Amino acid sequence: LRAQEKRGAQAPASTTDGQAMDVVANVRNLQETQEGVAHGAQGVGLLRSEFLFDDRASAPDENEQAAAYMAIAQALGPQRSLVVRTLDVGGDKPLSYWPIPPEANPFLGLRGIRVSLDQPEMLRTQLRAILRAAPLVQMHIMFPMVALVEELRQAKAILAEEQKALGQPRVQVGMMVEVPSAAVMAEQFAREVDFFSIGTNDLTQYTLAMDRGHPKLAKLADGFHPSVLKMIALTCAGARQHGKWVGVCGGMASERMAVPVLIGLGVRELSVSVPAIAAIKACVRSLSLTACQALAQEVLQMSTSAEVRARLASFAEGLS
Ligand code: PEP
Ligand code: MG
């Protein structure tokens, strides 16, 4: 029985009507990657590369970064995918050795890809290190906090130069969708990336203009708000026009109640916290794509998060 359970945990998850869903892990280091594999993750959908840069006196060099990415890639192996997100600092995530001048609105200032484009040498070093690990895994590179097509183009141009210098290692290139402009312009962005990964934590914050960590706003800053669901729908519609795939790596993907609506909106990869992998796979296996699609269309018409949550709760009950 144990062996059977283990095989079940490792098997990919599909809906009852045969739609395959990738259930992958959000990780911060090698240990979490190993735990993710043991729990049945089909890959890593978000490697938060900040772990290499935090709590130290200076930035890691190319060799140190390459060794870390290679170890993670090796733990996954050539059949699994690895999405490395380039450094996502600024805003709520400062770096002691990276002097970002004080800003009046850090969440609207130098964050994510904006910091990398401001410090291109550091981005180049990181990209070279990631590319060196590419032959060991199905490597994906993802840029955070992209708001403008120009930012994506600049980052891709730098990547292309480094790829050329290293003999064109194969990678898929994607971006986080966590700013409303990226969701609204998903069709244009989809012409220029291989995939999207929706960061519902920041997308909720920026869509509702509510600080994601504000104690008084915590209840209102809700990813189930219809405005956020519409952003997800726009992202999937834009991607579909160009045959690109969409994942969700924000906290919503780890919430069972969100899974039917995400599938119904067109999401095909759920990147979840390691402890949630088994429950999210089980949830996927209990759902039909057709029912999820009808549910998604229904909740998109609603006016409040409370209405959406009530409907999703009744849908979940109807299944059990
Ligand atoms: C997000 O914003 O949803 C996300 C996954 O990125 P982070 O939480 O690291 O900002
Ligand atoms: Mg984010």
Image (spheres, helix red, strand yellow):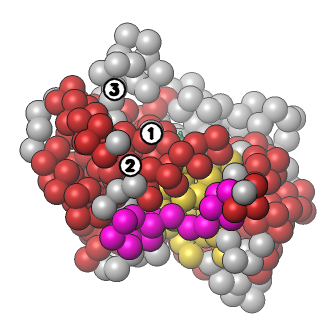
The residue located at (72%, 57%) in the rendering is: 1
Residue in view at x 34 percent, y 80 percent = 243
Image quarter of residue 228? top left
Q: Is residue 58 magenta?
A: no
Q: Residue furthest front?
A: 1
Q: CA distance from mark 2 to mark 1?
A: 7 Å
What is the C-alpha distance between the residues marked 3 and 1?
15 Å
Q: Quadrant of residue 51?
A: top right
Position of 162 with respect to 154 (left or right) is: right
Classify 97 as above or below 40.
above
- Disc 3 residue type? Ala
Q: Which mark is residue 221?
A: 3
Q: Position of residue 16 (x, y in %)?
A: 37, 65
Inspect this view and state whether residue 121 appears.
Answer: no
The residue that mark 2 highlights is 259
Q: Residue furthest bottom?
A: 167
The residue tagged with tag 1: helix, strand or loop? loop
Name the side, left or right, on which 50 lies relative to 30: left
- Element at label 3: loop
Q: Alpha carbon of mark 2 to alpha carbon of mark 3: how far?
A: 19 Å
Residue 20 lies in the magenta-colored region? yes
Closer to the chain start, of discs 3 and 1, is: 3
Q: Name the spot of residue 164 as percent of width and height, x first.
A: 69, 86
Q: Pointer 1: what residue?
A: 255
**Marks 2,1: beta carbons within 8 A:** yes
